Amino acid sequence: MRYKYKMATLLFRYIISFVPMVCHFFGWWLVYQVVIFHYGRSLFQINEKCYYHLTCTYIWHSLNKNDFLV
């Protein structure tokens, strides 16, 4: 019983350790979405193809850098 409790605690801590990273990523993701989608399209006349290319590039670089474009 003690072993199961210890393993469950370790698993819980491991999962919780990803929470700040995920929140950080989605926080910047929302900022990016608002800036590009609501302002960028009207200011810079970004079309659909360019918008999706920027989105994919953002995700790709975020995942590769591991610091999520701070």
Image: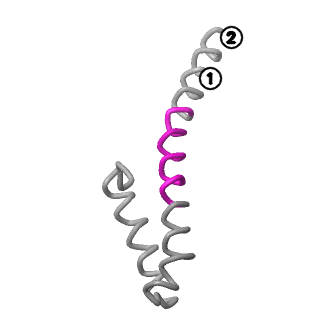
Say left or right for 62 vs 47.
left
* Residue 28 versus residue 4 in the image, above or below: below
Coordinates of residue 14 in the picture (x, y in percent): 51, 31
The circle drawn on residue 1 is: 2
> Could you tell me which quadrant the N terminus lies in?
top right
User: Chief secondary structure of the magenta span?
Assistant: helix
Coordinates of residue 25 in the picture (x, y in percent): 48, 52
- For mark 1, give the secondary structure: helix
* Stretch in magenta: 16-29
Residue 38 forms part of the magenta stretch = no
The circle drawn on residue 8 is: 1
Q: How many marks?
A: 2
Looking at the image, which residue is at 38% across and 66% down? 60
Looking at the image, which residue is at 52% across and 47% down? 22
The one nearer the camera, 21 or 38, is 38
The one nearer the camera, 49 or 13, is 49
Residue kind at label 2, given as amino acid type: Met
Coordinates of residue 9 in the picture (x, y in percent): 59, 20
Local packing at callout 2 (Cα closer than 10 Å; few below 14, some 14-19, many 20+) is: few
Question: Dividing the picture into quarters, in which one does residue 6 lie?
Answer: top right
Mark 2 touching mark 1, by CB under 8 A? no
Local packing at callout 1 (Cα closer than 10 Å; few below 14, some 14-19, many 20+) is: few
* Residue 5 versus residue 38 in the image, above or below: above
Query: Farthest residue in the right direction?
Result: 1
Residue kind at label 1, given as amino acid type: Ala
* Residue 18 versus residue 10 in the image, above or below: below
Query: Farthest residue in the front direction?
Result: 43
Looking at the image, which residue is at 44% across and 73% down? 56
The circle drawn on residue 18 is: none
Query: Farthest residue in the top direction?
Result: 2
- For mark 2, give the secondary structure: loop
Task: Answer with mark 2 or mark 1, whichever residue precedes in sequence.
Answer: 2
